[in-house]
Image (cartoon, rainbow, N blue to C red):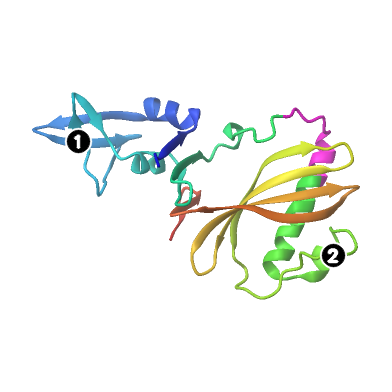
Amino acid sequence: MKRKLYITLVVALCSFTSIIGLAFAKGNIKIVVNNQIITSDAAPQMVNNRVMVPISVISKALGANVNWDQKNQTITIHNNNRSNQNDIWKQELELSSSNWAGVRNLIGTYMIGFDERDDMLIKSVTVEGFDMIPIGGMYPAIIDYTIVDAQDQKNFLKVRVKVILFEDELKGQMWDFVIAKGKIESMRMVQHFDVDQYTVFPGLTYTD
């Protein structure tokens, strides 16, 4: 199976604009990103008059997160700039800023309740009979989460959230929330993905 490489446009553009240059000195190729020399276990190589550099090292130096999906044999590179995320459901939403703030706050409250195993906090933002109450496990475990897309289904709003957790290992998941009438009706995990390294912000990076 061929490995696929998905690089967001922003990462590609940043690669061209942020890499100051490759210095050549008797076969010794240096990688310089934003005026800093970057070291790599895999040395850059000249192949057919082209310089080949490790994409993982370059991407991480530019602030992107690199994930490996063993099952699908896929490398994904996500830039941390939220305005450049993939449009999953390709829908233009007509939500007022106050309505969206309410949705965001519901999810934020749920995340705190889930991570702290606070049943009462979760019940405060979910409908009666909601059964996704956390039990067991190591808490807190969520080190970051990002709302990546939303879809309006007339009577409810579906919101997808990228969640990064660190329990016994670093891992990533996608959660789908269904929200209606100011309450969370359901939450389900829809995807797992491998995370070797995750940068919450410059200066705070977790490695598996």
In front of the other: 21 or 186: 186
Q: What separation in Å lies between label 2 and label 1 (alpha carbons)?
A: 56 Å
Report the amino acid beneath label 1: Gln
> In x, y percent, where is residue 128?
90, 63
Residue corresponding to mark 2: 123
**Quadrant in which the C terminus appears:** bottom left
Q: Residue visible at 80% across and 40% down?
A: 100
* Mark identifier at residue 45: 1
In this picture, residue 55 sits left or right of residue 79? left
| Tag 1 secondary structure | strand
Kindly state the secondary structure of the residue where label 2 is placed.
helix
Residue at x-position 62% and y-position 71%: 139
Q: Position of residue 175 (x, y in %)?
A: 67, 52
Q: Which mark is residue 100?
A: none
Residue 45, quarter of the rendered image: top left
Residue at image location 71% in from the left, 59% down from the top: 111
Give the residues drawn in magenta, as a range: 91-102
Q: Quadrant of the N terminus?
A: top left
